[in-house]
Image: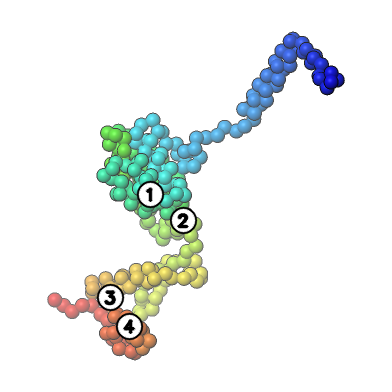
Amino acid sequence: MCWTLQGPLPRRSRGRTLHRTVGLTAITAVAAALACGCSPSVAPAAEVSYGAHIDTITPPGLRAKQTMDMLNSDWPIGPIGVRTLAAPEKVDLVGTKMDSIWWDRPFKVTSVDIGAAQATLHVLTSYNVAQDIELRTNDAGLVDRFDVTLVPPKIETWSDIDTELTKSGARYSYRVSKVVGGKCEQVAGTNTELSLPLASIFKLYVLLAVSDAIKAGTCAGTITSRSPRKARSSGQPAWTSFRPGPRSPYGPPPSR
């Protein structure tokens, strides 16, 4: 059975092994150096994701960065996460305010002001609307004040309106008219040839403006409205006081 046993392995030269080890180490070092030299420098996550850099060496800066992390996350704002940010007595308030603007993500930080126990984030929403997020930290480093302010755009001309609407990236159309001699004359407008669906909220704005003008005595005239029989039969309380057919004119309120 001796033929099944292996003989003694040849001994390797210690010098040869050392030479090979040194050679492999040198090759590895060169490869690492080349990789470091060729790869582009990567900016911190805050700068890449959020725009301006947020310094986190102070409690307000740390909470400002955490705020942006939470607002730009796809995870909804919830009490568990907010408890790591806000003081216990402010969790509900801070969570409600953060949730109300979370839907406007992603946010871009244009600049940040960090002071003693407070920080202000100047941000742009996903549709380029400017907002300020102000927070204050307590002695424990948790947020005990959280305010969100909409920065109103500067509107002085009709073209300023176009500029702001264009920045939002929305497809829009508007027309502003005045009544002259019983006819509407256009004062300003953009993309008036576009046919866009009107949501009920816009109709409510118009009706509210007319209502306020009538109450103020600055609007009068005659209109014809119609109350369909089907509407009366639908059981809607608002229609029960209307008779089918034309209705009466409107005008300023009586003198008091």
| N-terminal-most mark, 2 or 4 | 2
* Residue type highlighted by circle 3: Cys
Residue under pointer 3: 219
Q: Name above or below for residue 2 compared with residue 72.
A: above
Question: What is the spatial separation of the Cα atoms under label 2 and label 4, in whole angstroms?
Answer: 42 Å
Corner quadrant of residue 186: bottom left
* Residue type highlighted by circle 4: Gly
Task: Locate residue 250, reporting x and y percent.
Answer: 27, 81
Around disc 3, counting alpha carbons within 10 Å, would you say few (fewer than 14), some (14 to 19), or many (20 or more)? some
Task: Locate residue 80, reporting x and y percent.
Answer: 37, 45
| N-terminal-most mark, 4 or 1 | 1
* Residue type highlighted by circle 2: Ser
Residue under pointer 2: 168
Foreground label between 3 and 4: 4
Task: Residue 149: tell me if it is visible.
Answer: no
* Residue type highlighted by circle 1: Gly
| N-terminal-most mark, 3 or 1 | 1
